[in-house]
Image: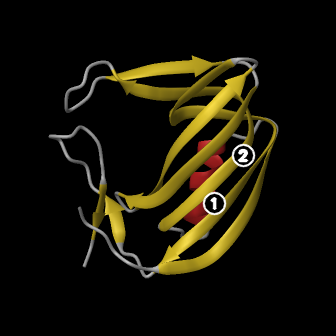
């Protein structure tokens, strides 16, 4: 285990409207506001999205399983923003449901808002971290810089 200590910096309240692309808009905001270390909460609805719902087998690096939908789903999410290759990278885990069906996973790719979604971003001050690709693991975990 590794950890660093910081504090909450700026706070952003964001409204995304019908047709906006959730991930693209958040990455754009993070780039425009120079947010390189943050966590956020999401609530609202998404019309179309793709989720990584786990590995096909319990091995590392994983071969991921995808689930998607193309109709309106209510959504709750928790995510973070850290630099990867000098650019802000969104990592969002979300639960999406419609009727009695629900899906939980890592939201990636297209993520079109249905009606409205709200995001509350808490910038993390005093934390120097970035995502660095690890070929053995098959993804880019957060690495702390001292």
The mark found on residue 29 in the picture is 1
- Residue farthest along the left direction in this orientation: 136
- Which numbered disc, 2 or 1, marks the residue that appears first in the sequence? 1
Residue found at x 20% / y 27%? 59
- Residue farthest along the right direction in this orientation: 115
Q: Give the vertical position of 107 relative to 50 (above or below).
A: below
Is the residue marked by circle 1 packed among few (<14), some (14-19), or many (20+) residues within 10 Å? some
Secondary element type, mark 2: strand
Residue 75: quadrant of the picture: top right
- Residue farthest along the front direction in this orientation: 100
Q: Quadrant of the C terminus?
A: bottom left
Residue found at x 54% / y 30%? 104
Residue found at x 59% / y 58%? 40
Name the spot of residue 86 as percent of width and height, x first.
Answer: 38, 62
Secondary element type, mark 1: helix
Q: Give the vertical position of 145 relative to 134 (above or below).
A: below
Residue 99: quadrant of the picture: top right
Is the residue marked by circle 2 packed among few (<14), some (14-19), or many (20+) residues within 10 Å? some
Of circles 2 and 1, the one toward us is 2
Q: Would you say 135 lies left or right of 51 here?
A: left
The mark found on residue 43 in the picture is 2
Residue 46: quadrant of the picture: top right
Q: Give the vertical position of 97 relative to 44 (above or below).
A: above
Residue found at x 74% / y 58%? 14
User: Which of 67 and 87 lies nearest the eye of the viewer?
Assistant: 67
Q: Would you say 121 lies left or right of 137 here?
A: right
Name the spot of residue 121 as percent of width and height, x first.
Answer: 63, 63
Name the spot of residue 142 as percent of width and height, x first.
Answer: 32, 58
Q: Quadrant of the N terminus?
A: bottom left
């Amino acid at each position: 285990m590794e950890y660093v200590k910081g504090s909450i910096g700026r706070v952003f309240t964001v409204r995304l409207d019908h047709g906006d692309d959730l991930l693209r808009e958040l990455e754009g905001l993070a780039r425009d506001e120079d947010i390189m270390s943050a966590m956020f909460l999401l609530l609202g609805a998404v019309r179309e999205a793709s989720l990584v719902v786990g590995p096909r087998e319990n091995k590392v690096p994983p071969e991921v399983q995808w689930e998607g939908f193309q109709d309106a789903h209510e959504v709750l999410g928790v995510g973070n923003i850290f630099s990867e290759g000098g650019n802000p990278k969104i990592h969002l885990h979300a639960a999406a449901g419609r009727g009695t069906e629900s899906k939980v996973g890592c939201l990636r790719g297209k993520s079109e808002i249905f009606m409205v979604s709200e995001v509350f971003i808490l910038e993390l001050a005093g934390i120097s971290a970035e995502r660095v690709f690890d070929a053995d693991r098959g993804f880019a975990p957060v690495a702390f810089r001292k």
